[in-house]
Image (cartoon, grey):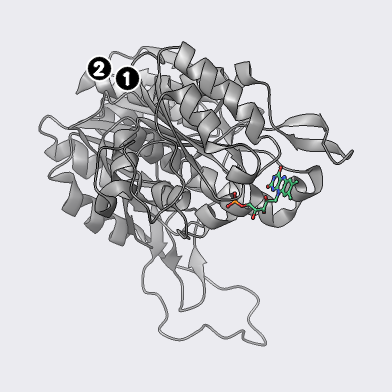
């Protein structure tokens, strides 16, 4: 997996910087072409010369001076390395650099490259336990994960300070395996394909402040968009109202109601090779939303809400389908398999993904999911409990065969 791969290693100012020397050596031994960029703080821990000797390339750290490593002029060096790499691994990733990347700062060569690159970004956080468990660091890491960065879980144990807890730089072997696993998942096998994904719930207005909605978090659809983009597809994500970061290299279109989602999907479907409808679109919406907030009436015990069916996006896509691969999702509380198979047939889908509500590790807010994938011939496969990112890749593997 490593042979011939261009791996850019970003070293930041942490005590574990010396361990990255061994990481560079292992990656080079595995056949990778490795270049190293360091922050100024990192150079206080290990000299650039050490990394140059291990990688066989000049180590870069200064945004403002030219060097021979990239064979480029100073004017484009910061972009050239971003495009040169197949993978950018920041190890160790200091709390400071994690915070900078999460907020889009780019005041040194390493953070400029992190912002500029469209290639997969892997972070290996390493810091004192108290810095690691600090909610702001955890929030920054969660943000970066939502955007599609890969975070290597740090090890637990004793730190240089004597503190015990999480935040230790892991051993080199697990890091190399993690890198190989990422490279395996981001093969550009969907390059040139255009994939339209929908995600999240829809909100149907009752009045200007209230709505009818559902519990979808959008995580499954966002994971599909992220995985497809990492595999090289051009991805448009039509998202209902959710609080999730946009995955890197994904074009996001925000919508609110089923009608908005219908319009956005119809606009973007024209160019799509595949449509994956992971959104939980409301089936019914209030017939005539009130223009002003509905007031509580003193003597009124009940309030009736009249609902009308919303446009059926999947059925419309199925009717007009000409060569586009169409994937739907189903969530049933009873007769799941039979109902999902009927939906697949009725809406002219190529695949349907049946979500489970009852299995442990499945459900709306969960980061894992338990799904059954059913194809046109009625063949169904129940997958084990997997992270939503892995479920996304399982779905995409099957979509790829149909494209
Ligand atoms: C001796 C020493 C060890 C440090 N170790 C770490 C560390 O392991 N992790 C970390 O996040 N910060 C550590 N720091 C703090 C960072 O070096 C500091 O936040 C610095 O600004 C990081 O800069 P950079 O992110 O640009 O590399 C350490 C500082 C010192 C003086």
Q: Residues within 10 Å of mark 2 (few under 14, many from 20)?
A: few
Ligand 1 within 8 Å, label 1 CB: no
- Distance, label 1 to label 2, CA atoms, is 5 Å
Counting from the top left corner in percent of width and height, residue 246 is at 42, 52
Marker disc for residue 88: none
User: Can you identify the residue that label 1 sits on?
Assistant: 398
Counting from the top left corner in percent of width and height, residue 201 is at 45, 53
User: Can you identify the residue that label 2 sits on?
Assistant: 401
Q: Which one is nearer the viewer's eye here, 221 or 131?
A: 131
Q: Which of the 4 quarters of the picture holds residue 350? A: top left
Asked whether disc 1 touches disc 2, contact meaning CB atoms under 8 Å apart, the reply is yes
Counting from the top left corner in percent of width and height, residue 44 is at 64, 45
Counting from the top left corner in percent of width and height, residue 169 is at 69, 31
Q: Which one is nearer the viewer's eye here, 338 or 177?
A: 177
Residue at 35% from the left image edge and 44% from the top image edge: 117
Indicate the secondary structure of the residue bearing disc 1: helix
**Residue 303 higher or lower than 341, as above or below:** below
Camera sees residue 35: yes
Left or right of 205? Residue 214 is right
Left or right of 357? Residue 108 is left
Q: Residues within 10 Å of mark 1 (few under 14, many from 20)?
A: some
Left or right of 33? Residue 313 is left
Camera sees residue 216: no
């Amino acid at each position: 997996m490593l042979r011939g791969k261009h791996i850019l290693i970003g070293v930041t100012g942490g005590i574990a910087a010396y361990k990255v020397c061994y990481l560079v050596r292992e990656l080079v031994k595995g056949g990778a072409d490795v270049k190293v960029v360091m922050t100024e703080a990192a150079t206080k821990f290990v000299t650039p010369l050490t990394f140059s000797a291990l990688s066989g390339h000049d180590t870069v750290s200064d945004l403002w001076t030219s060097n021979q490593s990239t064979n480029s002029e100073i004017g484009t060096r910061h972009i050239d390395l971003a495009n040169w790499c197949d993978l950018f691994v920041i190890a160790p990733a200091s709390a400071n650099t994690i915070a900078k990347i999460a907020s889009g700062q780019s005041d040194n060569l390493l953070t400029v490259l992190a912002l500029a690159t469209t290639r997969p970004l892997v972070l290996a956080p390493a810091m004192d336990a108290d810095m690691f468990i600090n909610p702001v660091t955890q929030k920054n890491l969660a943000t970066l994960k939502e955007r599609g960065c890969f975070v290597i879980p740090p090890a637990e144990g004793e730190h240089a300070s004597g503190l015990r807890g999480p935040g230790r730089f892991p051993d080199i072997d697990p890091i190399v395996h993690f890198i190989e696993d990422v490279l395996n998942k981001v093969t550009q096998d969907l390059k040139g394909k255009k994939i339209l994904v929908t995600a999240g719930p829809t909100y149907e207005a009752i009045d200007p402040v209230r709505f009818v909605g559902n519990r979808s978090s959008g995580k499954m659809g966002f994971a599909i968009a992220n995985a497809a983009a990492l595999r090289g597809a051009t991805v448009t994500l039509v998202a209902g109202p959710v609080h999730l970061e946009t995955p890197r290299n994904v074009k996001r279109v925000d919508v609110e109601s089923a009608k908005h989602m219908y319009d956005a999907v119809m606009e973007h479907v024209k160019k799509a090779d595949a449509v994956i409808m992971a959104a939980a679109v409301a089936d019914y919406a209030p017939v005539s939303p009130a223009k002003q907030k509905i007031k509580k009436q003193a003597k009124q015990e009940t309030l009736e809400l009249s609902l009308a069916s919303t446009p059926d996006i999947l059925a419309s896509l199925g009717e007009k389908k000409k060569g586009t691969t169409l994937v739907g999702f189903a969530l049933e509380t009873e007769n799941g398999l039979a109902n999902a198979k009927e939906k697949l047939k009725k809406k002219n889908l190529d695949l349907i993904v049946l979500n489970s509500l009852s299995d442990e590790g499945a459900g709306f807010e969960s980061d894992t999911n338990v799904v059954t994938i059913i194809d046109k011939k009625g063949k169904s496969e129940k997958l084990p409990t997997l992270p939503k990112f892995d479920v996304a890749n399982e779905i995409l593997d099957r979509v790829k065969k149909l494209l």
